[in-house]
Amino acid sequence: MPTRTLARARAFRPPSPLAGRLATQSLLFALGEGTFMTGSAVFFTQIVGLSAAQVGLGLTIAGVAAFVAALPAGRLVDRYGPKRMWALSATGQAGLFAFWPFIDSFSGYVAMAVAMEVVGSLGGAAHGAYTIDVLPPDERVKSRAYMYSALNVGFTLGSLVGGIALAFDSNVVLNALPWFTSCVFLVNGLAILRLPNASHDERTPEQRRERLPGPGPLRNPGWLTTTFFGGVLWTNQVLLNIVIPLWLVEETDAPRVLLAFLFGTNTVMCIFLPMAAARGIKDVTTALRAVRVSTSFFVLSCLITLATHDTVGWVTIALVWIGHVTVTGAELYLSAASWSFEAELMDPRRRGEYQGAAEFSGTLGRVWAPALYTFLAMSWGAGGWLLIAAIVTAAAIGMHPASRMAQRFLEREGLDPHDFAPPEEASSVVPAPSLLEDPPLSPAGDGFGPPTAQR
């Protein structure tokens, strides 16, 4: 095999065997979730018999429930161990997905949606705490980048499976979608149990009954402010998935088929570029540098997109595409920064609770964006785009003193964020046979991460 080909193959290998196994979990999660999400709109309206308004209302209620459950879920993770809670969440969601075909009313749909979101909230806190606990400090960002690539591979495969199912135009096949997802989540839950224990999983029953020492994340204003600003920065997803597509359809002469190429470009970039974006990100200082790069891409996307209002033909198509590429760059660099913030700014004794608090404050930082950004871009035009860019720039500026405040909080408490580091042999665990044997050859979530982060 040529040397260049070998070098490229090595570039797609995981940073460690353990990172490869964790990437397998990311792929399994996204395969199941992506399959169901692709057909969910048709499933809820055609099988469950709901209106579009009822689907939206149910998702809103479920989102509020997950928001409320974030902090208690984090405390459960700290008390009982992240691996145990992560596996419980995956198998719990497997059971819930299996019941979807038997739901035939709005009340049943709301109850199921709430249960799914609450159980998923537990999984999000557990997954984030587990990966920080079990990965060596110098591998955390690289490994999370590899897992993010695998996550996007899984969503791509899930979309393909879901699309094939929809092509049959059969209620029988639609009913099978949640059962397929249930099987994937069950396999994922069982595979999680085969992963090595994290440090918090080794606590004795007596230690679990003890109250954790020190103040919780709600008394750490630096962490809450940092994650709030992180939520604001993650509104790049609103630009990516809502505002730019609406702008393309209503305010430009670009053909609608371009949307498929935009989302295809985003998927390819998020599969192959996370590790490149994460290179050199290892502490708060380098994470803040990545935030500045991410914000520059976000602002550039706003400027490029607003210019397409007055362009025509191929110029419009090229600029809209470049605007989508730059906002994807914002996503990639912010992902890398967020993984470093998680590793460096959490109380190592309370990583689950800190994950829950991050989900709580991060949601506050982004929940308002779909309505506001859509209004500003579609109603105010260039002025609206500039205001969107200003909001994100202000958040990036605010994140600098906020993260330093969070660092000083840990220093005052005498805490080292690298306490409870994994044993040296953890990163060299040999993958289990069969399912976990070969991680995906590819290069969010978690409360601080994107809204679509791992659960």
Image (spheres, rainbow, N blue to C red):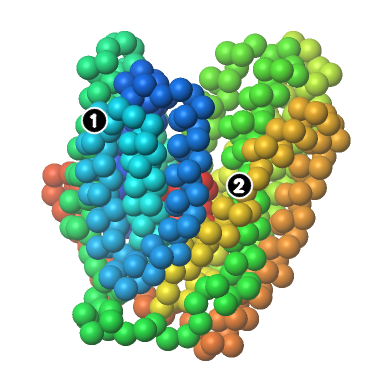
Q: Judge by depth and name the residue closer to the eye, 46 or 366.
A: 46
The mark that comes first in sequence, 2 or 1, is 1
Residue on which disc 2 sits: 367
Residue hosting label 1 = 102
For image coordinates 25% across by 28% down, the residue present is 101
Residue at 64% of width from left, 38% of height from top?
370
Identify the element where label 2 is drawn. Answer: loop
Residue 320 percent location from the top left of the image: 69, 24
Q: Is residue 4 above or below residue 347?
A: above
How many numbered marks have been drawn onto this rendered protein structure?
A: 2
Query: 161 left or right of 353?
Result: left
Q: Is residue 256 left or right of residue 58?
A: right
Q: Residue at x 81, y 17 (%)?
A: 311
Asked if residue 441 shows in the view, the reply is: no
Q: Amino acid at mark 1?
A: Phe
- Which image quadrant for residue 364? bottom right
Q: Quadrant of the N terminus?
A: top left
Q: Amino acid at mark 2?
A: Val
Q: Position of residue 122 (x, y in %)?
A: 36, 57
Cα distance, mark 2 to mark 1?
Answer: 31 Å
The answer to whether the residue labelled 2 contacts the one labelled 1, judged by CB atoms less than 8 Å apart, is no
Residue 244 image position (x, y, % from top left):
67, 28
